Image (tube, rainbow, N blue to C red):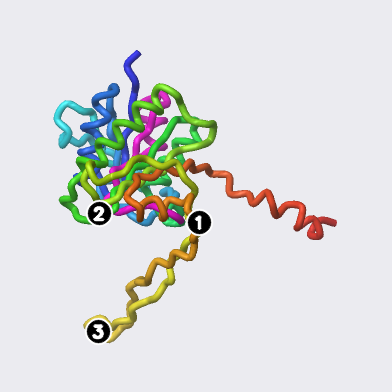
Amino acid sequence: MNKLILVTNDDSIHAKGIKELVAVAKLFGQVVVVAPEKPQSGMGHAITISNPLRIQKYDGFNDVEAYECSGTPVDCVKIAIFEILKRKPDILLSGINHGENSSTNVLYSGTMSAAIEGAMESIPSIGFSLADFDADANFEATKNIAHQIIDKVIQNGLPENTCLNVNVPKLSMKDIKGIKVCAQAHAYWDDKFDSRLDQFGRPYYWLTGDFSDMDQRENTDLFALKNNFATVVPTHFDLTNYNAIENLKYLEK
């Protein structure tokens, strides 16, 4: 049976990365693209509730059915499933993101939130990211990695309520040592705000900061990426800290 494959992203339907992912996805089945009409990076799991959602056909993928959506990546997944496809796809692919989504970046990522939404709908879902923010980045190695992973997921499936967060270093395929399944690193952004004045003398701010990797474990995505491996982090949406439940029993009456 021909697989029905939903492709989305957060860099917008016009980004190079999604076109490269569609080229790989077409090798596995019928592809339908539903992606944001404009960049939605950093939107996380946001949904649109105070404005109408609009979709229109997009002809930028030649023989692939595609729609651009006014909403977020998660909006795209929802409207694709319930209004465009009329059934759940066999697999959901998100990306290829321009820039990595390793460690705690997954919490902010629209690319990965689309994949997590897919997992919430019991769809095998994978988010792909390349550690290169260039709009014209070379995606050949990432396409190779994506092909390998998609093929294996279609054959073997994924654990329930789990999606994959795949990150690829900015290297040629010959320099990538392999694929590592690993843990999400414990790291964070040391946020700073650049304060400026507009032409009217009113203050405004740009969010800046440095990424602090305090995690020295050797089984993490950051460690593997630094050592020239593509990484796969099994990701789920249950944020419960089960180890803390017993310790917090004092809160109960």
Query: Do labels 3 and 1 touch, CB within 8 Å?
Result: no
The image's mark for residue 217 is 1
Of 168 and 163, the residue lying toward us: 168
Left or right, 166 with respect to 61, comes to right
Give how far across and how far down residue 111 sits, in percent: 36, 46
Q: Does the magenta run of residues contain 94?
A: yes
Q: Secondary structure at mark 1?
A: loop
User: What residue sits right under mark 3 in the picture?
Assistant: 200
Magenta stretch: give its range.
74-103
Residue 146: quarter of image: top left
Residue at 31%, 83% in the rendered image: 202
What's under tag 3, amino acid-wise?
Phe
What's under tag 1, amino acid-wise?
Arg
Q: Specify few, some or many for label 1: CA neighbours under 10 Å numbering under 14, 14-19, or 20 or more.
A: few
The image's mark for residue 132 is 2
Q: Which tag, 3 or 1, sits closer to the chain's start?
A: 3
Give how far across and how far down residue 31 sits, in percent: 28, 27
